């Protein structure tokens, strides 16, 4: 029997509603707990209708203006990417940068970790979400993978890798141009470290991997399971960290450096599908991270990919992170994971 429990509590209460002449209005909040970490996520069905005013719709004219203005001085565009982006010393990357198709990996001028390359994904300065092709995404991962191989050869320490993306300003990106970033560090950063510790504790307690059990449980109950593509299982998270969160769990591997070419292709194919789905919901901005641990440290851990949507682009928008997320590390569910999964299935 697995040690996974999908725990949720419902709390019912009333308010006197000023829009209904102060009549008593019954309300409910549901508090869910992540089965591995215990992190809480809050769902209030009454907020669903308010979500539109939270997130707004993308302002198409504003998007065009931002894209045009930012393209004038973009260092990832045209020849600039090979002229003005930072190179690695030859003892790390012999050619200074790594190219795979249109993807080009270079050193981040403002690193937040020991190894922190950036990969520009495309020649295009701006892409609609449905324009992130599997090939383009995969080339970015291939470049990141080549970099990790070089780091693994020269540095024997325990290394934690997160391959991440911020797309557009609401997701915290400082540049419009599609790119990903990879952090390879001897210290696991907070969330990554919590995943590793909790996965190991689960493994020791249940003599089984949390991720294998999760895949099995989610397949069995069928509410949040989306599809299997190669070695990756795609599902919505029971207690998500962000809006419209979709996760992919590798069936066994914990180390990005050990993933096969097929694994990378399948992952990229799935990401492309999720982005197409996000576009169908009217979203344009997203974040994702792929978490990896160098073998043999990742006992009980599997490579896990998480992707979420962010605020839409319009003037004077309100950021969707506030105290609930930043201070309490709790997330708000707008679209129920169980409703999201069947909608995404048709994209797979
Ligand atoms: Zn550009």
Image (cartoon, rainbow, N blue to C red):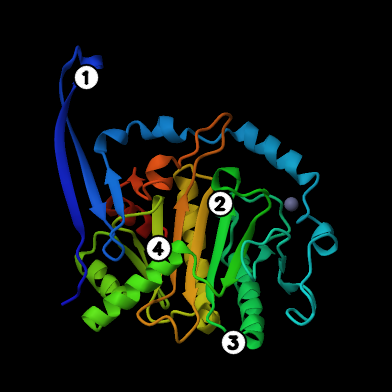
Categorize mark 1 by other alpha carbons within 10 Å: few (<14), some (14-19), many (20+): few
Residue pointed to by mark 1: 17
SS for callout 1: strand
Mark 4 near mark 2, Cβ–Cβ under 8 Å? no
Q: Earlier in the sequence, mark 4 or mark 1?
A: 1
Quadrant of the rendered image containing residue 157: bottom right
For the residue pair 114 and 255, the one nearer the viewer reads as 114
Mark 3 near mark 4, Cβ–Cβ under 8 Å? no
Residue pointed to by mark 4: 247
Residue at 38%, 81% (x, y): give it.
Answer: 252
Image depth: mark 4 or mark 2 in front: 4
Residue 283, x across and y down, in percent: 49, 44
Residue at 56%, 29% (x, y): give it.
Answer: 316
Which label number is shown at residue 156?
A: 3
Residue 259 in sight in this render: yes
Residue at 32%, 56% (x, y): give it.
Answer: 341
Image depth: mark 2 or mark 1 in front: 1
Image depth: mark 2 or mark 3 in front: 3
Q: Earlier in the sequence, mark 3 or mark 4?
A: 3
Quadrant of the rendered image containing residue 182: bottom right
Total labels: the figure holds 4
Residue 336, x across and y down, in percent: 29, 48
Residue pointed to by mark 2: 129
Residue 4, x across and y down, in percent: 21, 69
Q: Is the C terminus in the top left, top right, bottom left or bottom right quadrant? A: bottom left
Q: Earlier in the sequence, mark 4 or mark 2?
A: 2
Q: Earlier in the sequence, mark 2 or mark 1?
A: 1
Residue 305 in sight in this render: no
SS for callout 4: strand
Image depth: mark 3 or mark 4 in front: 3
**Distance of label 4 from label 1 (alpha carbons):** 38 Å
For the residue pair 241 and 226, the one nearer the viewer reads as 241
């Amino acid at each position: 029997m697995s040690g996974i429990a999908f725990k949720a509590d419902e709390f019912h209460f009333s308010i006197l509603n000023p829009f209904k002449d102060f009549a008593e209005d019954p309300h409910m909040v549901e508090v869910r707990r992540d089965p591995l970490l215990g992190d809480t996520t809050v769902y209030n069905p009454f907020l669903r209708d308010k979500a539109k005013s939270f997130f707004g719709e993308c302002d198409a004219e504003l998007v065009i203006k931002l894209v045009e203005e930012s393209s004038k001085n973009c260092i990832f565009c045209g020849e600039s990417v090979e002229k003005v982006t930072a190179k690695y010393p030859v003892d790390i990357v012999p050619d200074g940068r790594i190219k795979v198709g249109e993807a080009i990996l270079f050193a981040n001028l403002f690193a937040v970790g020991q190894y922190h390359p950036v990969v520009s994904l495309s020649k295009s300065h701006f892409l609609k979400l449905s324009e992130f092709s599997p090939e383009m995404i995969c080339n970015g991962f291939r470049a990141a993978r080549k970099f990790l191989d070089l780091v693994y050869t020269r540095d024997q320490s325990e290394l934690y890798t997160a391959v991440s993306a911020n797309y557009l300003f609401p997701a915290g990106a400082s540049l419009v141009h599609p790119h990903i970033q990879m952090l390879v560090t001897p210290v696991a950063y907070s969330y990554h470290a919590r995943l590793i510790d909790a996965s190991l504790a689960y493994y020791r307690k249940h003599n089984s991997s949390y991720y294998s059990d999760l895949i099995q449980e989610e397949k069995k109950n069928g509410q949040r399971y989306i599809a299997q593509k190669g070695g990756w299982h795609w599902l919505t998270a029971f207690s998500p960290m962000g809006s419209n969160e979709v996760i992919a769990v590798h069936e066994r591997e914990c180390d990005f450096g050990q993933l096969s070419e097929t694994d990378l292709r399948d992952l990229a194919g799935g990401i492309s599908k999720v982005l197409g789905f996000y576009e169908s919901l009217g979203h344009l901005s997203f974040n994702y991270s792929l978490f990896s641990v160098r073998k043999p440290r990742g006992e009980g851990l599997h490579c896990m990919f998480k992707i979420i949507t962010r605020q839409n682009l319009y003037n004077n928008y309100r950021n969707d992170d506030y105290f609930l997320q930043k201070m309490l590390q709790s997330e708000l569910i707008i679209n129920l994971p169980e409703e999201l999964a069947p909608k995404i299935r048709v994209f797979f």
